[in-house]
Amino acid sequence: MSVIPAALAAAAVLAGAGALAGIVLPYRLRIPAVGVLTAGVGVGGGTAGVAALGGSGWAGTFPGVLPLAGAAAAVDALAGLFIAVAGAVVAAVAVYGIGYAAGHGPHGLGSRTAQAVLPPFALTLVLVPVAASVSTFLALWELMALGSLLLVLAEHRERASVRQAGVWYAVMTHLGLVLLLAGLALFAAGAGGETFTALRAGAHTVPPAVRGLVFVLVALAFTSKAGALPLHAWLPRAHPEAPSPVSALMSAAMVNLGIYGLVRTGLDLLGGGPAWWWLGLIAVGGTSAVYGILQAAMASDLKRLLAYSTSENMGLVLIGVGASGLFAAYGDRPLAALALCAALLHVVNHSAFKALLFCAAGSVLRSTGLRDLDRLGGLRSRMPVTAAFFAVAALGAVALPPGNGFISEWLLLQSLIHGLAVPGVAVAVVLPLSVALIALSAGIAAAAFVKALGVGFFARPRSDRAASAEEAPILMLAGMGLLGAACAALALVPGLLGGSLDRAVGATGLPGGGAVSGGGLEVRLTGISAALSPVWVVAALTVALMAAVGLPRLYGRRRRRVNARLWDCGGGAPTPRMAYTATSFAEPLQRVFDDVLAPEQDLDVTPVRESAYLVERVRFQRRVSDRIEHRLYEPVLRALNTAGQSARRLAGGSVHRYLGYGFAGLVFLLLALAVGW
Amino acid sequence: MSAAVGYAAVAGQVVVVGAGAPLLTGWMRQVRARLEGRAGAGVLQPWRDTRKLLRKEPVTPVGTGPAFRAAPALLVATTVVAAALVPLLSTDTPVSSHADLIVVVSLIALGTLALALAGLDTGTAFGGMGASREMTVAALVEPTILLSVFALSIPAGTTNIPAIVTGAVHEPARLTSPAGLLATAALAVAVLAETGRIPVDNPSTHLELTMIHEAMVLEYAGPDLALVELGSQLRLTLLLGLLSSLFVPWGIATSASWAGLAVALVLFAAKLVLLGAVLAAAEVFWAKVRLFRVPELLAGSFLLAVLAVASSYFLSGAS
């Protein structure tokens, strides 16, 4: 028995044991037992994924598991990459989750339901990429959606907004499922088989119009799961309202599977397609990236900021996948491989830093009960380790060296900049715009994360709860430490992933370019070259930093630091209320993008009773709502509501009328059959 | 032999930028003073200021943290590493294969980010205000910079700066092409914004409410302030040097020879003196624009960069 099925079977057994432990064990034993078993699921999945990335594959069928078609499973390097990422995230977050849930009491994440659902949900995260037939894939996909839904609802007793987020998530994820079901059923019918092997073999027999429809349907479903526009509205609601370990799992592992599905169906099963598919995908990715990060820059809720940043990063990945398909459509396969490699590397990097960011936000939330940046602050002295982890992850998220996000964005930019070698006016217009959108999103991301770190963790506490924060317990720090180590490793030696990335790209039929190797990154295509070695950048920065600290000290005569008051304009010590808040920090950007964001503001001046000229109270309120949601969803919801109201008139309560409906329906059906066939 | 020249070139770049930055600032202030009818403090004044500040005792404002203390050194360090990478004197150095334009641009952005965090770390209104404004401007400059990088890398087929510079030296037509000129103009505006010069920011302002950069660093004193000042002087020198390397590359040594290096050194100094004088003279006639008019300026430069890429593609495709 090879490693992959053994590791996956072990993960499944551990998940089963975990679910059982969640139901049976009393509160005190439940959380550590479920945590350890879930971590085991992650380790099992990670092992299988790493084995698949190492070059071994596996395929198997289980006729009895699902009715009619049975279940089919296969693991190649592409699946392996996503399994390994999901496994690693699950393992680290499970360790973190033990500490997190233990402090919350027997409700919320520590409840019997949540603890019983957590291990199976972790298992589905690992198993979705293993599916090798449409029915298996859809079954696992739906199990994953249900598991995450139950976990999002874990804290429904504490906040009403959780229930609302749950409804949004349930509706939108099932809308996605319907789209996916329609698309894949259409594909399977056209290709004459529902296993992935049959789809791959039969893809070229499907007429182009049907292929296009299949792609549009599945792309809508998968980009919705990845949190890209326009079906993103669930993400900024569900991710902040879920318990933080669940947010981390969703944002760092579940959204990836949307990308996996897109790469699997679009590039592998359908075998690529015409340019318009990919131009559409790039447009979706570009708008998601900029719109997502703009909303993140406006958000003053820390977890909402992180959720919108997920939208941004998935947008960047979609640009990469779209560019890859576009280059392949024009026949430049090495460049297509480079773009896909960049996209996959960004998936890995994003998972590492986003899981860490959500965990750090979770430990702030657990310690202070606050997600509102305007009331946080000063945490660097009360929670130094958490603040340091947040800083490491934020460095990855802003895509600047020496963070890990920089490396994949650099690779993505390289593939786009050199894409002009591909002929076609559409390419010449789209690629520069994509580069500009990536640059703008990187710039705004810098502002957003400076805000999150600078306002949330630096300066002085803006509320009593922030002032009395305490450092997270050791298990939470250990989980964050694992993720922090992953971020550092990805930032310093991305070359370790080189061969694995090439094999994952190779699984879609594109030639692996060897862009990421040993000491760093090197792009060598015909007429194109570029190189980046992160270790050298870090070494040079360290030397320069030591020189910049040391030389002035050698020259200076007084070395002892003295304390002094902050400059207060002579008006007494400044209070924390005078400090800039997240809202005020974002104000200039909000003014610049006024037309895009369309903030609503409300000014309410109450004069004193005696005179209209003397003001007693001024109330100012400003809200930046999701405009796309406003414009796109509300008309649909209103139309649905109207349709529902008018449909009620059909059911007046009269039995005669219902019998009439039945009769009319039958007659209509018979007529249709008589005329049609 | 050639390796020794290469290392000398890198060391030379760092030393020239390091020692020359205060001189360039002093020179620009002097030009400005003379044009305004003042005597001026002399070219050496910024060095005297630095020396004075370095000898004062280090001060930590109460309530600030590690970010506040580390930021000045990080600002200087990122600029120094960038100065070692950019081919200011020679394109044939041991580090030239790592000298990627995107890396250099990102290193400079890292310095900005460190200072903005330091501004927020003070917890004062001015610190936050400066940080917020600086990050807004930085975010809006980014697309212009990367599109200019895009336009420059099309003819060279790489984002490696020494390769771009070598290509331009051997083929000067690249620089006078519409794409080259448009990219120059776009990048020049971006450099003005990144270095906080008029019309984006006024480096010699004394009114806090109009400050961008100065508001962030209001709490610094003594040796820390010396490093912050030196950092922004270094950044100005480096970015003007980068601009001159990309668009007036003549004189930069393309092979490893001592004579070439000496010529490059003299020409580099001459180019910077000229560029600095032009910038200082222009600043006499310009006024700082309102903060919320800055995006319009940057949008204009972005348009130039888009045109640069488009003309580079369509004109090269037609020929």
Image (tube, helix red, strand yellow):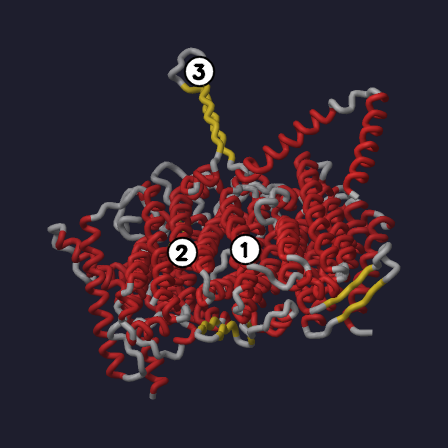
| Residue A243 on image: x %, y % | 68, 46
Q: Chain of mark 3?
A: A
Q: Is residue B43 left or right of residue A31?
A: left
Give the secondary structure at mark 2: helix
Q: Residues within 10 Å of mark 2 (few under 14, many from 20)?
A: many
Point 45% across, 24% down: residue: A618
**Residue receiving disc 3:** A608
Q: Residues within 10 Å of mark 1 (few under 14, many from 20)?
A: some
Which image quarter holds the N terminus of chain A? bottom right
Q: Is residue A361 left or right of residue B141?
A: right
Residue A545 vs B212, above or below: the answer is: below
| Residue type, label 3 | Val
Q: Is residue A203 left or right of residue B5?
A: right
| Residue type, label 1 | Trp
Point 31% across, 82% down: residue: B255
Find residue B112 and report its image quarter. Answer: bottom left
Question: What label does residue A276 carry, if any?
Answer: 1
Instruction: Kindly report the distance in space between the C-alpha atoms of the residues bearing marks 2 and 3.
Output: 47 Å
Q: Are the two marked residues, 1 and 2, in contact with CB atoms closer than 8 angstroms?
A: no
Q: Chain of mark 2?
A: B
| Residue A26 on image: x %, y % | 85, 48
| Residue B122 on image: x %, y % | 43, 48
**Residue receiving disc 2:** B112
Instruction: Kindly report the distance in space between the C-alpha atoms of the residues bearing marks 3 and 1.
Output: 63 Å
